[in-house]
Amino acid sequence: RRNISLNRTGLAYEFDLIYKVSYEIKTAKGEVIEPQQQFKVNREQYNDQFLIIGRAEEELKMRQEMRQEIAETLVRRMAFLLKNKSGA
């Protein structure tokens, strides 16, 4: 999480939420199909100073969605690479 902008009192007005994963894809025999890569997802969160109560829950939900997006992308990537490796 990093501040994107600050209001005039120095409080964060917007945050950049960052979720980064490093991965390497191997076969069951240990053969590397894809060398180590990084995948990153960013989201911006508006920090309304008047709606404090739901802010933590909103950030938690955004982070869960980011993890889900990365997981789905990696599964699709593995399926694609394994399909091409097997020649199907």
Image (tube, rainbow, N blue to C red):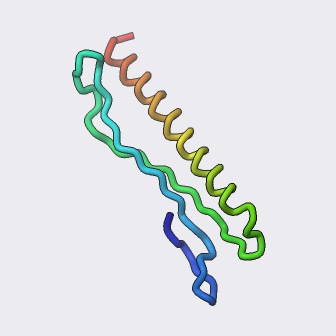
Picture coordinates of residue 9 (x, y %)? 62, 89
Picture coordinates of residue 28 (x, y %)? 29, 16
Q: Relative to 22, is 59 above or below?
A: below
Q: Residue at x 29, y 31 (%)?
A: 34
Q: Relative to 28, is 46 above or below?
A: below
Q: Residue at x 69, y 63 (%)?
A: 55
Picture coordinates of residue 17 (x, y %)? 53, 59
Q: Relative to 35, is 28 above or below?
A: above
Say which quadrant the C terminus sits in: top left
Picture coordinates of residue 29 (x, y %)? 24, 16
Quarter where residue 57 is shown: bottom right
Q: Is residue 49 left or right of residue 11?
A: right
Q: Residue at x 63, y 89 (%)?
A: 8
Q: Relative to 77, is 55 above or below?
A: below
Residue furthest to the bottom: 8
Quarter where residue 30 is shown: top left
